[in-house]
Amino acid sequence: FNAVIAACGNALQWRRAVDILKAMGKLDPPLRPNVATYNLAISACEKAGRWREALVLLRSMRMDANVTPLVHRDFRVREGALAAEGAAAPR
């Protein structure tokens, strides 16, 4: 799954990367994404400039008992989201 999500990120297919991440939990038996899986999906969102979606994934990662986000990634995603919000604000 990680290789496919990474390929989606390289192709700027952020939505597909997120869909694959979510689909892992619906398999029988369900697969639990690990830190690398989340980071790849977050990176796909970052590459496509989808900061809000990256933040949603960060929150999902935090809620998952076995996955702890990396501090530097958390900072970069928040920084990007704030920059995107600032750019979208009316002047």
Image (spheres, rainbow, N blue to C red):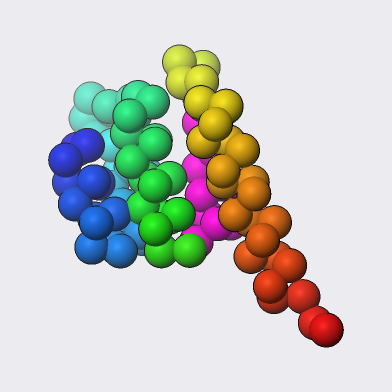
> x, y (%) of residue 49?
48, 63
- Decide: is 12 above or below 25: below
Residue found 64% across the figure and 49% down from its top: 79
Decide whether the magenta segment is chiefly helix, strand or loop: helix
Nearer to us in this view, 50 or 18: 50
Q: Is residue 53 magenta?
A: yes
Farthest right residue?
91
> How many marks overall?
0
Give the residues drawn in magenta, as a range. Answer: 50-61
Q: Quadrant of residue 52?
A: bottom right
Q: Quadrant of residue 48?
A: bottom left
Nearer to us in this view, 28 or 79: 79
Farthest bottom residue?
91
> x, y (%) of residue 28?
21, 30
Residue found 39% across the figure and 35% down from its top: 38
| Left or right of 74, for residue 47 | left
Q: Is residue 64 magenta?
A: no
- Decide: is 27 above or below 77: above
> x, y (%) of residue 17?
31, 52
For the C terminus, the quadrant is bottom right
Residue found 68% across the figure and 73% down from its top: 87
For the N terminus, the quadrant is top left
Residue found 33% across the figure and 29% down from its top: 36
